[in-house]
């Protein structure tokens, strides 16, 4: 049974299994990438994999080394994974190496700290786990939400749009002669979302809104309301639908996307998750249930590595069966 819980970071070990076969985490420039690992009981872990984008080592390297040091004196066997945000195939190959040891295991206990993965690498990881692990495996995902994003005097998280591409493992069923229906889950990076929509030039557009109670940040609702208003003005000649999803609950987000996808049955369906990592998991679950859904990724040119986010003292725990047919 899929479950979603939230609790204080200091209660983390009380909420986790007594034995963890594999713990997966990712380093990034965000200090949030260390929060869960710092509070995790290392003695209950059998194996650990620490991932990072090797092509961004100039600003990921410090936290990658810090993650490794946190587990150096602990019992678990450790492996490091070199991902590549410019080459999704390299990222998938890296994840495939960690799944081989668990293909023939009976219900391995796997815990993933999703906080610092890129949205694309997280989606690829889920696709690999679903492909390679036993069907009865439940995966526990952990997420440390931010208390705030960016410099409050000049809020920006990323700039520019390097490339828009479909995510490896989520090709959907795209027929060139059909119109495109774009389903977007916006986050704080509103410039990124606007550029992405312009690049797709969709015939119909579904924009997700996060109700106040379904968000991690109290100030986000006002910003996204203004963003949606501007989008409606910019795309007044096109069909625009507004729907609600959750930044906190991937199951609710999955169901919201599946409903939104029914709006234009004769169109190509493309979902772009730009919100929290739990909502990215929800987008993956929607694509697992509807194979005609393509998932896309908008790769930015530049991140605000100096003041992207500030960690909180909370944890969102999601225990998910990636193979569920319900």
Image (cartoon, grey):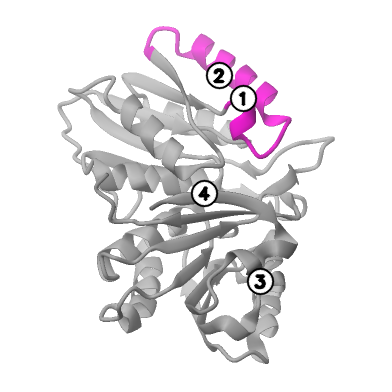
Marker disc for residue 228:
2
Mark 1 or mark 3: which comes first in sequence?
3
Q: Which residue is mark 3?
A: 37
Q: Residues within 10 Å of mark 1 (few under 14, many from 20)?
A: some
CA distance separating discs 4 and 3: 20 Å
Q: Which residue is mark 4?
A: 4
Q: Would residue 87 be found to the left or right of residue 274 on screen?
A: left
Q: Nearer the viewer, mark 2 or mark 4?
A: 4
- SS category of the residue bearing label 1: helix
Residue 20: x and y in percent read: 50, 77
CA distance separating discs 1 and 3: 32 Å
The segment highlighted magenta reads: 211-239
CA distance separating discs 1 and 4: 24 Å
Q: Residue at x 36, y 28 (%)?
A: 182
Q: Nearer the viewer, mark 1 or mark 3?
A: 3
Q: Main secondary structure of the magenta part?
A: helix
């Amino acid at each position: 049974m899929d479950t979603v819980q939230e609790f204080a970071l200091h209660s983390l070990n009380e909420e986790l299994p007594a034995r963890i076969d594999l713990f997966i985490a990712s380093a990034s420039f965000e200090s949030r990438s260390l929060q869960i690992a710092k509070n995790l009981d290392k003695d209950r872990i059998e194996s650990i994999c620490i991932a990072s984008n090797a092509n961004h080592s100039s600003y990921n390297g410090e936290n990658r080394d810090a993650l490794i040091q946190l587990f150096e004196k602990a019992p678990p066997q450790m492996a490091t994974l070199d991902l590549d945000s410019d080459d999704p195939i390299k990222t998938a190959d890296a994840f495939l190496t960690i799944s081989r040891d668990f293909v023939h295991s009976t219900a391995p206990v796997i815990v993933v700290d999703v906080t610092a993965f890129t949205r694309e690498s997280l989606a690829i990881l889920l696709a690999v786990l679903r492909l390679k692990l036993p069907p009865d495996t439940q995966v526990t995902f952990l997420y440390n939400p931010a208390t705030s994003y960016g410099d409050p005097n000049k809020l920006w998280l990323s700039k520019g749009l390097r490339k828009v591409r479909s995510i490896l493992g989520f090709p959907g069923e795209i027929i060139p002669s059909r119109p495109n229906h774009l389903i977007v889950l916006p986050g704080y990076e509103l410039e990124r979302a606007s550029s992405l929509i312009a690049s797709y030039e969709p015939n119909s557009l579904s924009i997700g809104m996060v109700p106040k109670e379904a968000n991690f940040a109290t100030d986000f609702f006002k910003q996204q309301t203004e963003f949606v208003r501007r989008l409606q003005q910019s795309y007044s000649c096109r069909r625009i639908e507004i729907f609600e999803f959750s930044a906190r609950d991937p199951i609710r987000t999955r169901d919201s996307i599946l409903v939104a996808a029914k709006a234009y049955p004769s169109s190509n369906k493309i979902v772009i998750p730009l919100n929290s990592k739990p909502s990215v998991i929800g987008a993956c679950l929607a694509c697992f249930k509807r194979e005609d859904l393509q998932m896309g990724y908008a790769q930015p040119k530049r991140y605000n590595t100096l003041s992207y986010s500030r960690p909180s003292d909370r944890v969102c725990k999601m225990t998910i069966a990636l193979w569920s047919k319900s």
